Image (cartoon, grey):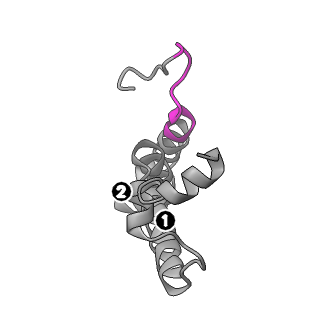
Amino acid sequence: MASGYGLNGGPSRCFVFWQELLGCYVVNAGEGDSGKKKCISAFEDYYECLHHSKEAARTRKLQAAYRKAEAMHPRENAPKAEQIRSLGLIGKEEATARILGS
């Protein structure tokens, strides 16, 4: 949240990362640009907490790998598109009559 407070009134989920980043900046303030370079890892942690970009990229890669594995090894006895659309009910009048005894 922009206010710094979470949904339930407590600190936001990224507040700990923000404190870590701020502490790093305070400790390394007098060193100019080299101070900022020392805080890159803290900044990346804070940014990831806010936006989840690395986690999203990892999830996309896992999903792509899963789809590729599924395509390489199709299921045996997988239902055909026609069977899925009709749920196996259309064209089964003889089986229905046999079961019902009509």
SS label for mark 1: helix
Residue ID for mark 1: 58
Give residue 92's position: percent from left, percent from top.
Answer: 49, 58
Circles 2 and 1, Cβ within 8 Å, touching? The answer is no
Q: Is residue 94 left or right of residue 85?
A: right
The residue nearer to you, when weighing 97 against 25, is: 97
| Figure disc tally | 2
From what the image shows, is residue 33 above or below residue 72? above
Q: Is residue 76 left or right of residue 30?
A: right
Q: Residues within 10 Å of mark 2 (few under 14, many from 20)?
A: few
Q: Tell me what residue is drawn at x 44 percent, y 63 percent.
A: 83
Q: Residues within 10 Å of mark 1 (few under 14, many from 20)?
A: few
Residue type highlighted by circle 2: Gly
Give residue 79's position: percent from left, percent from top.
Answer: 50, 69
The residue nearer to you, when weighing 97 against 34, is: 97
5 part of magenta stretch: no
* Image quadrant where one finds the N terminus: top left
SS label for mark 2: loop
Q: Which residues are magenta?
A: 8-18
The residue nearer to you, when weighing 33 against 8, is: 8
- Residue at the outermost bottom position: 72
* Magenta stretch prevailing secondary structure: loop
From what the image shows, is residue 11 above or below residue 64? above
Q: Tell me what residue is drawn at x 56 percent, y 17 percent.
A: 10
Measured in 3D between alpha carbons, the distance from the residue under mark 2 to the one under mark 1, in whole angstroms, is 34 Å
Q: Which mark is residue 32?
A: 2
Inspect this view and state whether residue 88 appears.
no
Q: Tell me what residue is drawn at x 51 percent, y 36 percent.
A: 14
Residue type highlighted by circle 1: Arg
* Image quadrant where one finds the C terminus: top right
The residue nearer to you, when weighing 95 against 87, is: 95
